[in-house]
Amino acid sequence: NSAPPVLVVNGIEVIYNHVILVLKGVSLQLHEKGIVALLGGNGAGKTTTLRAISNLLKGERGEVTKGSIVLRGEPIQNLTPSDMVKRGVVQVMEGRHCFAHLTIEENLLTGAYTRKDKGEVAANLDKVYNYFPRLKTRRTSQAAYTSGGEQQMCAIGRALMANPSIILLDEPSMGLAPQIVEEVFNIVKDLNAKEGTTFLLAEQNTNMALKYADYGYIMESGRVVMDGAAADLANNEDVKEFYLGVG
Ligand code: ATP
């Protein structure tokens, strides 16, 4: 991807609770309209990296103690999570976090909180339903009674309601049947192609993520140990031995 990077993470260290060093110098780049996979096992530091980018570390008693994160030329470390949303960066958290007692549509509308124009909100809701026809069918159902796949779609749909240019997606495949994972990833691909949305996708499911991403970073113990074009990583012998077949 030869477009200039929209987001540059440069050598960040992250410490939790003032003592636990979890990221030990992570660097990565996102290019406009890219789909980048952030791969690695449990505890490698993928979620922490996403939280650092979306400024959600403070709530977890974490902080970036070294390095920088620059969004379209602007250092973002002193911004709040809602500043990040205003700048078009939203995170879809692992475990989906739909509000169980709200309907699918009410959940989606909570994603529009930064926007006021009613017409715009309605148009956005239509757009979400267009990408996720399943959500339209289930719009009046309470989220608690929808499937895991529908809840994942709801979480992504809610993020879309903020009109993001960059979506940080944490383990979208978690707990979903392979067929549903494909359905979700196909929608990601579609959003990327038609809306130009840039994705950073944290995944343990290396196989699936490399099928849909154009570039990948592999993390281990708080460091990036390998990166490259998704096709090259998928064919790399070490990646095959250690990561493929996982997930
Ligand atoms: P997973 O797939 O389990 O989410 P991950 O690659 O996303 O893994 P992180 O969740 O970023 O990894 O965790 C990296 C390390 O940081 C782990 O050792 C974890 O125990 C630790 N960690 C995560 N959150 C906190 C926290 N709030 N306080 C202290 N340590 C934490």
Image (spheres, grey):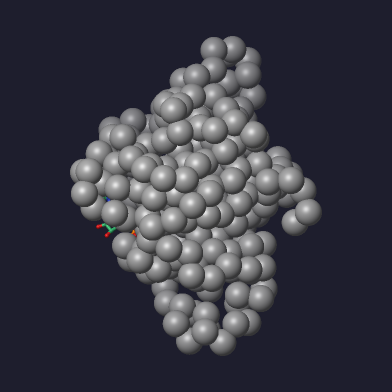
Residue 231 in the image: x percent, y percent? 67, 73
Q: In the displayed image of the protein, which residue is found farthest to the front?
A: 66
- Quarter of the picture holding the C terminus: bottom left
Q: Residue at x 60, y 77 (%)?
A: 234
Q: Is the N terminus in the top left, top right, bottom left or bottom right quadrant?
A: bottom right
Position of 49 with respect to 166 (left or right) is left
- Rendering coords of residue 38 (x, y %): 50, 60
Rendered location of residue 54, percent (x, y): 45, 38
Number of marks in the image?
0
Residue 136 location, x and y as percent? 53, 38
- Rendered image quadrant of residue 2: bottom right
Residue 159 to residue 19: above or below: above
Decide if residue 183 is in sight here: no
Please name whichever residue, 221 or 151, is drawn nearer the observer in this view of the structure: 221
Using the image, determine if residue 155 lies above or below residue 119: below
Residue furthest to the right in view is 2
* Residue drawn at the location 32% of the way across and 62% of the way down: 43
Q: Quadrant of ligand 1?
A: bottom left
Left or right, 167 with respect to 97, comes to right
